């Protein structure tokens, strides 16, 4: 069992040019004010018991959560299409997300906060809590390394990514079943899990008070990628269309928090 807690320490320097070598981070998505993907809706249940962050997919905390499938693979993907499932819960303090991946060609080369983890075997959660405001991208490789940014449109309609400092991400807790680094790549069938907690305060630093989350509808998408593996692929919960970019808020689906 391995855990990563992003707390304290120096903030990693990350250039917005990450998008130039990471297809999953490409800019130029549609405006965030467009209508969401109405065909994709996920109900986020309130946790009856708090997840232990030990990867217990079928454990007491997760057994009542609905399951979503990340199964819409972009045409540019290789023939390797891993089975990717996820669940989400919330408490009064924040949200929990868990991914279960039945994979091959698993690799994890990056281990520092804000490294370009989309190059590795990686699962991602993009979320826009408030309409007409920016969205966050949580990207975590199988080794538990996090990249976190906030994106908002400027007056020119340009996507402006803001790197979330490590100090502001200190409350995020991550469990990962694989070692921090996986190299060489594992070609055999490999199942792995990433589970994490995000306090509401992380969102509120950028979009203000959330109020009572129960009953709210947020826009979001869930992804799986492995840009630089031997068998690259890009999959989404809500389809992203022909453009190979996860940064398309117009393609986000809806997550509704149960009342």
Image: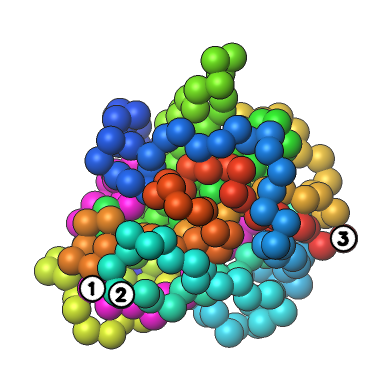
Contact, CB < 8 Å: mark 2 with mark 1?
Answer: yes
Q: Give the residue at x 49% y 27%.
A: 159
Cα gap from disc 2 to disc 1, whole angstroms: 9 Å
Mark 2: which secondary structure? loop
Estimate the x, y position of residue 229 in percent, counting from the top left.
21, 63
Contact, CB < 8 Å: mark 1 with mark 3?
Answer: no
Q: Which residue is mark 1?
A: 105
- Position of 76 compared to 158: left or right? left
- Position of 102 compared to 109: left or right? right
Q: Mark 1 or mark 3, which has the lower sequence index? A: 1
Query: From the viewer's perspective, is the residue at label 2 or at label 1 nearer?
Result: 2
Q: Which residue is mark 3?
A: 259
Q: Is residue 42 magenta?
A: no
Q: Residues within 10 Å of mark 3 (few under 14, many from 20)?
A: few
The part of the chain drawn in magenta is: 93-118
Q: Is residue 120 visible?
A: yes
The number of numbered discs placed on residues in the rendered structure image is 3
Estimate the x, y position of residue 27 in percent, counting from the top left.
42, 35
Q: Give the residue at x 82% y 62%.
A: 258
Query: From the viewer's perspective, is the residue at label 1 or at label 3 nearer?
Result: 1
Rendering quarter of residue 25: top left
Q: Which residue is mark 2?
A: 80
Q: Is residue 105 magenta?
A: yes
């Amino acid at each position: 069992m391995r855990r990563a807690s992003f707390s304290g320490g120096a903030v990693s320097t990350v250039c917005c040019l990450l998008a130039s070598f990471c297809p999953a981070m490409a800019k130029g998505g549609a405006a965030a004010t467009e209508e969401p993907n109405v065909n994709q809706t996920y109900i986020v249940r309130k946790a009856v018991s708090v997840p232990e962050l030990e990867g217990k997919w079928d454990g007491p905390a997760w057994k009542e959560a609905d399951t979503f499938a990340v199964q819409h693979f972009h045409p540019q993907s290789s023939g390797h299409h891993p089975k990717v499932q996820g669940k989400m819960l919330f408490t009064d303090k924040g949200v929990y997300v868990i991914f279960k991946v039945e994979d091959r060609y698993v690799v994890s080369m990056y281990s520092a906060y804000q490294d370009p983890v989309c190059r590795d075997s990686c699962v991602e959660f993009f979320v826009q809590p408030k309409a007409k405001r920016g969205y966050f991208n949580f990207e975590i490789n199988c080794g538990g390394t996090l990249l976190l940014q906030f994106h908002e449109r400027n007056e020119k309609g340009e996507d402006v990514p803001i790197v979330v400092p490590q100090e502001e991400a200190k409350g995020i807790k991550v469990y990962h079943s694989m070692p921090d680094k996986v190299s060489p790549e594992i070609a055999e069938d490999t199942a792995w899990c990433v589970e994490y907690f995000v306090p509401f305060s992380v969102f509120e630093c950028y979009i203000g008070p959330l109020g009572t989350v129960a009953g709210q509808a947020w826009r979001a998408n869930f992804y799986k990628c492995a840009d630089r593996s031997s068998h690259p692929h890009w999959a989404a919960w809500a389809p992203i269309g022909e453009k190979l970019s996860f940064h398309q808020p117009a393609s986000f689906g809806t997550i509704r928090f149960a009342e």
